[in-house]
Amino acid sequence: MKQKETLLNIQLNGEKIELSDTLIDDMGDNHVSTSVDTPMRADAFVLSDDQKIDVIAKHFTAIMETLGLDLTDDSLKGTPKRVAKMYVKEIFSGLNPANKPKMAMFDNKYQYNQMLVEKNISFYSNCEHHFVPIIGKAHVAYISNGTVVGLSKLNRLVQFFAKRPQVQERLNMQIGKELQKALGTDDVAVLIDAKHLCVASRGVEDNTSSTITAFYGGKFQEDKTREEFLKYIEFKTEF
Ligand SMILES: [Zn+2]
């Protein structure tokens, strides 16, 4: 207990801040430590978005100055704040569970019990090892067990998990598991085909390779169902 309290007290501008019980509960709900979850600090949401933007802007200023850039130049002046805002409000906004799309469910009135496939969902993520883009497409499928989800929610769920520092395997698992939970069925498939700019633009500088990962739950573990899914998405690598 003592240790937990120490963990959850942080200093902001010299002022000690303690987390409320509700926030701690929320975090417990959303950040149970398993290998599938993004590793998050206990104090991840103590700062507001605006406070985070201020802190990141300061640090980014230091990075740019260390690189030798002159921040009094008109073109560079606004960059630290711009980057900070982009991190918090856009490309890493999926770290905050508050931004998770609400997965409203509907009755499957048509009794459509076949496979539903949403293919070519494009997304941008960032590699957590280099903080450079991962550009890819996700193909998502499920077999309804009585409820269906609005189609755009599938796209939004992919975008939400993509907007984190990621590794592709985890991104793939997070989308698959969340869909299983929301739809109340194991019969979910998610295939991701993505290009990692840390491979393409630096390092080995391979601009043609892409990485494929797949999550197959329930019936999708059977050859026949999986083959049907792969046929529907006409699986081929293309950007
Ligand atoms: Zn990387």
Image (cartoon, helix red, strand yellow):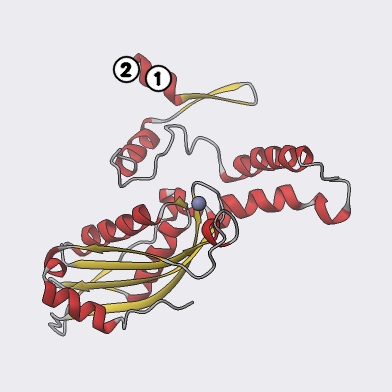
Whether residue 3 sits left or right of residue 66 in the image: it is left
Please count the marks in the image: 2
Give whichever of 119, 42 is nearer the camera.
119
Q: Please tell me which residue is depicted at 72% across the width and 47% down the height of the picture.
A: 80
Residue 5, numbered label = 1
**Above/below status of 43 relative to 94:** above
Q: Is residue 148 visible?
A: no
Q: Please tell me which residue is depicted at 70% across the width and 53% down the height of the picture.
A: 82
**Above/below status of 115 relative to 215:** below
Amino acid type, label 2: Met
Q: Position of residue 68 (x, y in %)?
A: 81, 41
Q: Please tell me which residue is depicted at 25% across the width and 73% down the height of the picture.
A: 141
Could you tell me if the residues under marks 1 and 2 are in contact, i.e. CB atoms within 8 Å? yes
Q: CA distance from mark 1 to mark 2?
A: 6 Å
Residue topped by disc 2: 1
- The verdict on label 2 being within 8 Å of ligand 1 is no
Whether residue 123 sits left or right of residue 224 in the image: it is right
Q: Please tell me which residue is depicted at 32% across the width and 55% down the height of the picture.
A: 174
Q: Which quarter of the figure has residue 28?
A: top left
